[in-house]
Amino acid sequence: MEYASFLRRHIEQVVSLTDEEFALLLPYYKPLTVAKKQLLIESGDMVQAEFLVVQGCLKAFMHDEDGRQHIIQFAIENWWISDYPAYAKQSSGDMCVQALEPCFVLELSAADKETVCNLVPKMYIFHGRKAFSGYVALQRRVLSMMKSSPKEKYELLLQQYPALFQRVSKTMIAHYLGVSRETLSRLERK
């Protein structure tokens, strides 16, 4: 798969690069083909990388004490995914990251991210803005979970990411919204 032009477009949505700068960065983004249902991160793993989705759909999730699955994040093309609390500390994590379809991702280790930023300092801006955007999205999700009714959460997700409903099972959407599958069915009928 041709991923270099994808990566360059992705980066240049935030910062512009010269051909020389991009050539320095490219080798640090490791291409990976991921089979459907394959785990990129398992609970208890040392988390040393994050992943940029070039093609496909993944989920980050955890199980509670009762074995219920809680989906923290979906990631489709142009999105980053990892177990970020563990990635930030370079420690073992509590979450899993799994492919929901055949995927092609670019892996960036924490060490390589630091190297990339040192080689091309404007990459600090790129990664900072990506992290900030992710933080904003997470905060919006938390606020929505706290103050919105199941119907409002469903409608917001449908409005923001309609394509997700074509790629992800209803059960997974229910896990992500924190509602039962039956509740989700009722919301869809309304």
Image: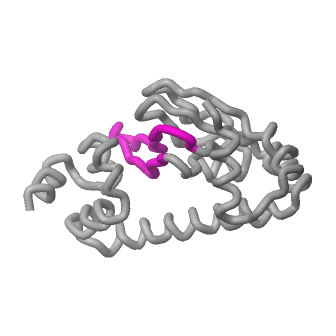
Q: Quadrant of the C terminus?
A: bottom left
The x and y percentages for residue 109 are: 75, 41
Left or right: 22 as drawn, with respect to 80: right
Residue at the spot 41% in from the left edge and 40% down from the top edge: 63
Which contiguous range is marked in magenta? Answer: 53-76
The chosen color scheme is: one colour
Looking at the image, residue 184 lies above or below residue 39: below
The x and y percentages for residue 68 are: 33, 41
Residue at the spot 31% in from the left edge and 65% down from the top edge: 159
Main secondary structure along the magenta-highlighted residues: strand
Residue at the spot 42% in from the left edge and 32% down from the top edge: 101
Looking at the image, residue 143 lies above or below residue 93: below
Q: Quadrant of the N terminus?
A: top right
Looking at the image, residue 70 lies above or below residue 187: above
The x and y percentages for residue 66 are: 33, 40
Residue at the spot 84% in from the left edge and 51% down from the top edge: 19
Figure quadrant of residue 82: top right
71 within the magenta span: yes
Left or right: 7 as drawn, with respect to 21: left
The x and y percentages for residue 116 are: 84, 50
Residue at the extreme bottom of the image, as rendered? 147
127 within the magenta span: no
